[in-house]
Amino acid sequence: MSLFTLERTVPLTLDEAWRRLTDWPGHGDLVPLTRITVATPPPTGVGTRVVARTGVGPLLFDDPMDITVWCPPLDDEPGLCRLEKRGRVVLGWAEIEVRPGPGGRTRVLWREELRVSFLPRALDGVVTSVAQTMFGRVVNGLLRRG
């Protein structure tokens, strides 16, 4: 499995950073050839299913994820969301955490463990590098949006 952590410190409130990072369809706007939908009715919480559909033409696959932890930030308390990846192609989990940072800023932690089912374990390093780059761009893009 590939395990990586992304960290950012941003000039946003905890609530605003959380709102931007949990804008599920917004994630798809930042990943090529991917569309993300929420397959369960609002509001978002434990049990919400998010589905990333990636590919083009007949080369499509779904990456369904279930939210298993949903603790939005409250006042100055950190927020945490955990998604379990339950697809046939992509497996693992992701955690998004927002917590108070220095100078009234917000510290963002994105932790993810993933495995691509048809790739040999020998390619875990490549998967980690690609995933870190891709998700780093997603996190940066979401945090920049207004």
Image (cartoon, grey):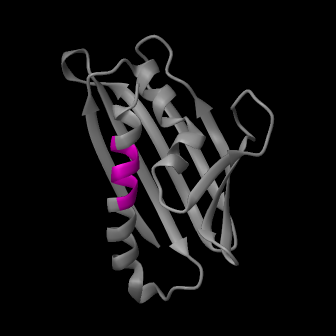
Residue 31 placed where, x, y %?
Answer: 47, 56
Which residue is at the front of the view, 25 or 12? Answer: 25
In the image shown, does 133 or 58 lie closer to the viewer?
A: 58
* Vertical comparison of 81 with 59: above or below: above
Q: Is residue 128 left or right of residue 27?
A: left
User: In the image, is residue 101 above or below residue 104?
Assistant: below
- Which residue sits furthest right? 41
Check if residue 60 falls in the magenta segment. Answer: no
Q: Position of residue 41 (x, y in %)?
A: 80, 34
Residue 22, horizontal then vertical, whole percent: 54, 35
Q: Residue furthest top?
A: 75
Q: Residue at x 33, y 21 (%)?
A: 12
Q: Is residue 111 left or right of residue 81?
A: left
Q: Position of residue 99 (x, y in %)?
A: 37, 27
| Residue at (61% x, 54% y) in the render | 35
Q: Main secondary structure of the magenta part?
A: helix
Residue drawn 69% across the image and 66% down it: 87
In the image, the segment drawn in magenta is 134-140
Picture mark count: 0
Q: Which residue is at the far front?
A: 57
Left or right of 42 on screen, residue 138: left
Q: In terms of image quadrants, where is residue 92?
A: bottom right
Q: Is residue 65 left or right of residue 74?
A: right
- Whether 62 is drawn above or below 93: the answer is below
Relative to 101, residue 81 above or below: below
Q: Residue furthest left?
A: 103
Q: Quadrant of the C terminus?
A: top left
Let me know if residue 137 is in the magenta part.
yes
Q: Residue at x 34, y 52 (%)?
A: 136
